[in-house]
Image: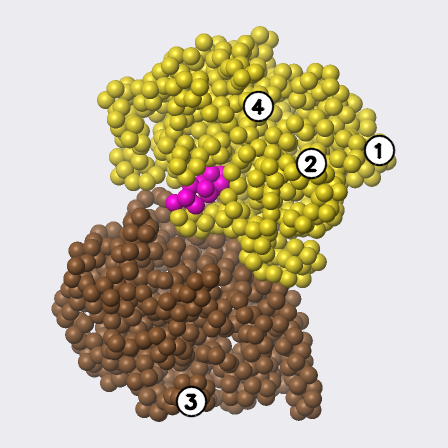
Chain colours: A yellow, B brown
Amino acid sequence: MSRSKLNRLTFAAAALATANAIAIASSLLSGQARADEGMWLFNALPKKQLASKYQFEPTQAWVDHVMLSSVRFNSGGSASFVSSNGLVLTNHHVAADTLFKLSTAEHNYNEDGFLAKTLEEEIPATDLELNQLISIEDVTAKVNEAVKPQMAPADAFKARQAAMAEIEKESLDKTGLRSDVVTLYGGGRYHLYRYKKYTDVRLVWAPEAASAFFGGDADNFEYPRYCLDVTLFRVYEDGKPAKIDHFLKMDPNGAKDGDLVFVSGNPGRTRRILTSDAVEYQRDTALPRTLNLLRRREIALQQYGLEGPEQTRRGRDDLFGVQNSRKAYTGMLAGIQDPSYIEANRKSEQETFSTLKADPKLAGLAGAWDTIRDLQSKRREMLLKSASLRTQLVGFAEKIVLMASDDTKPSAQRLREFRDSARQSLEQELFSEVPVYEDLERALLADELSRLAEDRGINDPLVKTVLAGKSPRTRAADIIAGTKLMTAEGRKELAKQGLEGIKNSTDPLVKLIRDMEPEYRKIREATEAIDEQERQAYAKVTEAKFAVGGDSVYPDATFTLRLSYGAVSGYESKGKQVPAHTKLGGAFEHEKVHLEKDPWVLPKSWHAAKDKLNPDTPFNFVSTADIIGGNSGSPVVSRDGAMVGIIFDGNIESLPGDFYYSDKQARSVSVHIAGVLEAMRKIYQAGHLADQMGK
Amino acid sequence: MSRSKLNRLTFAAAALATANAIAIASSLLSGQARADEGMWLFNALPKKQLASKYQFEPTQAWVDHVMLSSVRFNSGGSASFVSSNGLVLTNHHVAADTLFKLSTAEHNYNEDGFLAKTLEEEIPATDLELNQLISIEDVTAKVNEAVKPQMAPADAFKARQAAMAEIEKESLDKTGLRSDVVTLYGGGRYHLYRYKKYTDVRLVWAPEAASAFFGGDADNFEYPRYCLDVTLFRVYEDGKPAKIDHFLKMDPNGAKDGDLVFVSGNPGRTRRILTSDAVEYQRDTALPRTLNLLRRREIALQQYGLEGPEQTRRGRDDLFGVQNSRKAYTGMLAGIQDPSYIEANRKSEQETFSTLKADPKLAGLAGAWDTIRDLQSKRREMLLKSASLRTQLVGFAEKIVLMASDDTKPSAQRLREFRDSARQSLEQELFSEVPVYEDLERALLADELSRLAEDRGINDPLVKTVLAGKSPRTRAADIIAGTKLMTAEGRKELAKQGLEGIKNSTDPLVKLIRDMEPEYRKIREATEAIDEQERQAYAKVTEAKFAVGGDSVYPDATFTLRLSYGAVSGYESKGKQVPAHTKLGGAFEHEKVHLEKDPWVLPKSWHAAKDKLNPDTPFNFVSTADIIGGNSGSPVVSRDGAMVGIIFDGNIESLPGDFYYSDKQARSVSVHIAGVLEAMRKIYQAGHLADQMGK
């Protein structure tokens, strides 16, 4: 998954709290997951904990069924199969990327919603790839074998990448399945994930954004909520609805207070393995930098939107994503800026060191913490040295240009994103007919050029080359006016010409990327060398954690399928008890309390159907399941393996979940499936689809 | 003027362009003002230029009349006397600070406007101080006398401050007038300004924000414009309308295309004297930092506003100010990020050096450029070391606590803001009944604590002390809950207790400031030492400029009265001619073009009066006069010394004006006095006030 997509992922958040930092940190660092903590591997589920706390023992059939019913949106989210004829249920905000790409100045599917009355009316998405996880295989030994102790970090990194690419290639050739080697425990384990891919994905039904994102940025990460944050797609094969063996049944009576529920989805990233020194680097350097960049982009997109209603529409998807990330990162940083958190962390590390020192076989592992500490200052040095400009268009150009150079080498020696086994997915991304807006690209490129100049200073050689003697605004305008890469056709054409064509290209954007390429590769290589050293160190940290915590250790999130579990449960906030559930009728009250002012305006469809709706239908609910961005759209599943809801958010107390878990106040937030079905039938004339669900 | 006020100043902008950077820069650096450039001292007007370009020779009576009719708003803006009975005309956005302070959840004078039908209905402003400049005296020799060549910079700074404070004290005692020694030419000259003060200032009439700020943030710095950005106050003495000898006559037929006009106001700050090295420091370090802080505050205020309509109201004035500054600084930075600008600058400096070297008496001056270059890296080191938290409440607390320590010393040895001669104005600021909002202060303080922790790292000793083991949010909540400084009474009470009381205070905010005081003073002293060294260096740069440019050299803006001049003149933009004037009727068309969507919604009063209005009345106009933030509200005056308009903005091309001037596209933007009078009479039932104006 590309970095830009990972950034889009920081959507919902994980179920963790700021409050009880001391207990949390020590549980984490001793490596033992307590309460309902954990994003578990499907091949290493926490059977003991489930049996002892919930008297639940999943059968292999149950596990396989949930795994095979789960779906990953490669654009950055989760979902599930919900019918035998290919229906896939995800969040509206996961679908938003597609809804925006399908929209035009005339049809705004994001704002106005969409309903296909027949199969013929279902609209093919532009560039979606959906993945269904088929199998997991441990390949740790094979990956580590390639790395020899005496290798310099940069060489070790390359050797490891090559080993991974070879495993993937071999698997792809053998099975025809998408094959990804996943780095787990920060480098402690390597697993091969095989996926069935679906690339003919069609839009079936979406409610209006005003209902899906009711309460907007103001309500985001808040609870109680009243959001119909769902959208239906359908996967096709050979031009027909795909026949799906494993799909979820519907249980509209499920997810009652206290019920055990499971979340099967793809949490994007957590960093709970980080040592205290690494957390301090995040706290004092990396996150502040990220937040500055997010705020900068947020303002740039707001300014662009002021230019007119069409500009507002064009920028909205990005703006929502950025606002969401900014709010998430702010909460995350606030969580780790609590001095008591890091204090407890350090104390717990000291305890770990004592345990390690007591055992001669483990004593050597403690050195890994020192290695990681020393690497943080190297990271700090690298931070401002990026040689990338972050816009959609530049991202396309960068990949095409770098790919052309790398394609002259064997697959295993290329940058990881250019390996053969990932080529099909990459081409889907680069050559799809997605809208690229000239004015938006011009505005963002100007801002990015300005940012690069600020980061490096205008006298920096790279900046001099990039600006070519012009101001950022003029230069951006020139590049956008001159490039042919705005269209899929232009991008295909360039890629077809290969390295020679690119070298001779007069396209100003291609020339820009060519100019930046040497510096980009230099920085990339230096970063990869740091990554490799950290990987080796975290492998030791993982060993230490297994030694202390036994089989209650789960790996950090990696945007691969995980199972979380917890109880449907309200919580206390500001001295009051917040109930676990909201009801459909509550949406109208919530609108009234906020004087029916934007963003608390329900769509007309809701008011028209108000009398027909059962106001007591459960609408949203919270549970203690451990989630994070990327889990958006994950099915919430009962003991019986039936669907009771769909994850769409975490509450504000859950935001530090990137770094630690708590079940005190932090909750994951879901749409209840009863609310979804009631709304489909009574508000959206989508009864014919509701009837297909679970069958 | 306090720093917080200077920040509020970056309102309108100066009339300068990005385009013709080369010509501009060389004209500046040779020290010669060309075209209509210049913010001229009233005691050193550009008589030659006016005579040769405009055949205008101001008499001393004309100069005195314009000077004495001009008014400074100490809250950060300009204005003028417009009647013999004390009426003062300024911008709505200059008045906004007062309009917000007078507003409550029930009466929103900023949004809804205000009209006093009788004198009795006029509302006293909470904390305004208006200044009328009475005289200017050159005291350079006296100030420089105090500084001996062998003094260390920190000592030299103190000696100079002491000399300035003594001159001011002596003048105050002698004349009873507010007496400020103003540093001109970055330290090249010192002038004593004496002001008559007005502190009983009452609100008379204000239009709705929707008319004053029509087009909002989107139209800000744009042209054509249709804004009634005006508000009327009246100054009182002894409880009665003050009798004013010098006030402006109205000339509704003035400011025709090509007419010579003058702007008499208080430009806040320009930095045109900066050497290339100093500009590079601004470009690569200081301005990016400022922009990060502005964007951070903008997002924090937006988030606060999302909490409800009352929060939106409470935060709006700050939010507008911050958005305005962010837009201004963005344009400023864009201007100096043009590599051709700094290249031309450097080339021109080389030419200056050649001239200097050719004259043995001047050759030594060139060393000043090296001194300034070396000082920039010291500035860079200081940048992240601030020990201040920027909120209104903390600002109050900081001043009261520092003042108590300083008051144990003689006036001349205190920090400049605590000198005796400035005490009355400072007390007006600290002890007025202005609204301080608990929830807003809590939100901003939490963000500022977080910012301090990011800047210095959580392990920094000051940060440890300040956070006291708590997270920024918890700490902010504790401080706000415990402090008594929210009210004027609480602040007066603390100040009355003096140093002993403050030392024993258990108020958490007082203790916080006490904890920060040593570091604050350390940094302040280090900064002042750098300032002093720059001051001495810029005195030499100024000498060099006078040597090269003769009497066509004007000093950078210092928020003191200046006279600018220029022609009413349209300009070319994107290949089209933009006419100099807009008309009242155009406002309705502008609303229609933008689909009557916020922020393009004219108030009801306008629609109700539409048929009565003469649509051809001039409304807004542009001229080449050289202005910058702080000029907001400046009268635009004809050859005959009559009022033809009032400055309220600069166009987007004028934003780099902080650093250089151009008349190619950059324009200052004014409300035409004919539009003001027509609107007062036909829309606002304020004919009785319009009748008083000019009489």
Pair 1/2: label in front: 2
- Specify the segment rendered in magenta: A309-324
Q: Secondary structure at mark 1?
A: loop
Residue of label 4: A199
Residue under pointer 2: A496
Q: Given the image, what chain letter belongs to the residue carrying mark 2?
A: A
In the image, farthest residue toward the right? A150
Q: Nearer the observer, disc 3 or disc 2?
A: 2
The Cα–Cα distance between marks 3 and 2, rounded to whole angstroms, is 68 Å
Task: Identify the image quadrant of the C terminus of chain B.
Answer: bottom left
For marks 4 and 1, the one nearer the N-term is 1
Residue A268 in sight here? yes
Query: Marks 4 and 3, how far apart in space?
Result: 76 Å
Identity, as a three-letter code, of the amino acid under mark 3: Ala
Q: Nearer the viewer, residue B662 or A511?
A: A511
Mark 2 burial class by Cα count in 10 Å: few <14, some 14-19, many 20+: few
Point out the tag, 4 or 2, that comes first from the N-terminus: 4
Q: Where residue A235 sits in the image (x, y, percent)?
A: 52, 19
Magenta region includes residue B509: no
> Which subunit holds the residue at mark 4?
A
- Inter-mark Cα distance, 4 to 1: 42 Å
Residue under the image location 68 percent in, 25 percent down? A180
Q: Are marks 4 and 2 on the same chain?
A: yes
| Label 4 with label 3: CB-CB less than 8 Å | no
Q: Which mark is residue B51?
A: 3
Which amino acid, mark 4? Answer: Thr
